[in-house]
Image: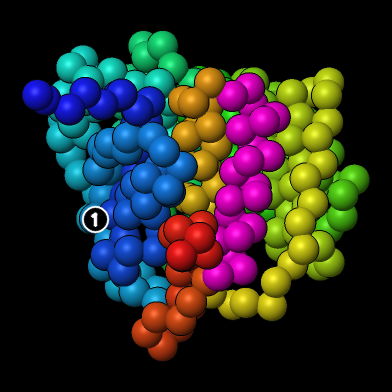
Amino acid sequence: MPIRTAVPPRVLTVAGSDSGGGAGIQADLKTMLALGVHGMSVLTAVTAQNSLGVQGAWELPVDAVRAQYRSVVDDIGVQAVKTGMLASAALVGTVAELLAGTDAPVVVDPVGVSKHGDALLAAEALDSVRTKLLPVATVATPNLDEVAQLTGVQVTDEDGMRRAAEEILAFGPRWALIKGGHLPGEAVDLLTDGSAEHWLRAPRYDNRHTHGTGCTLASAIASGLALGQDVPTAVEGAKAYVTGAIRAGFALGGGIGPVDHGWRTRQAG
């Protein structure tokens, strides 16, 4: 007799490829598998990337991105979408239009630069992120560098994180998650919808191998939402997952290695 299996929730990532496997589409799909959802992908750009940085990046045509999205959503369907590297104003606008017509929560990781400082978003695309992409987001997850790019706010303390959240929410997302990992001390993030505040704190581990943290966190949030969790619960679970992945991050090549997306499996073994 055939074996009947339950269909897991489906999560779509719209992002660029990291040939080194630590961030981007590769990190997203690993995270989704680890958290029990079915990951699908729309590729927006190809990067030549390793532990030392990004050696090259090539964005895909708008038509190719739109065709991938429609192919997945119209046939398979989605319970959540996560966006990452969108590269150009044209791609930002196209993806925002597609998301606006999709009945699923959206996690927007407004990727501007890589872990190594390489630009992953054209400067002229920032306004499209502000006016087109953030308004369709259920949760926006900027780090402090991305906050500065989008709002001009330079965050140096927790009060600054509040101001940053206000500025990000003014662009239209339902929730803002301001990631304070670049501040000294414990790793603190602020999640707010403009009324409720949720401060998420975790130990800071002395491990330089943190490539892929932003992609991993956003994908983990999207996975939680697809599983039916509310936003605070999904973000709390994602924070716990990425904290463990950072703690278990490992060296690859001669530079910054990736977080360990399979840390729970290895820990259980």
Residue 240 part of the magenta segment? yes
State the quadrant of the N terminus.
top left
Q: Residue at x 33, y 64 (%)?
A: 21
How far from the left and from the top, in percent, is residue 185? 84, 66
Pick the residue in front: 18 or 126: 18
Residue 213 part of the magenta segment? no
Residue occupied by mark 1: 46
How far from the left and from the top, in percent, is residue 155? 79, 53
Q: Residue at x 41, y 38 (%)?
A: 36
Q: How many marks?
A: 1
Pick the residue in front: 93 or 197: 197
Farthest residue to the front: give it. Answer: 1
Q: Residue at x 39, y 64 (%)?
A: 22
In the image, taking residue 183 as reference, residue 76 lies left or right, namely left
Identify residue type, mark 1: Val
Q: Residue at x 58, y 65 (%)?
A: 246
Few, some or many residues within 10 Å of mark 1 (<14, 14–19, 20+)? some
Q: Is residue 256 visible?
A: yes
Pick the residue in front: 37 or 100: 37
Residue 116, relative to residue 227: is it above or below?
below
When asked about the image quadrant of residue 102, the answer is top left
Residue 13, relative to residue 208: is it above or below?
above
Q: Magenta segment range?
A: 229-248
Q: How is the image coloured?
A: rainbow
Farthest residue to the bottom: give it. Answer: 254
In the image, taking residue 34 as reference, residue 48 lies left or right, namely left
Most frequent secondary structure within the magenta stretch? helix
How far from the left and from the top, in percent, is residue 229? 59, 24
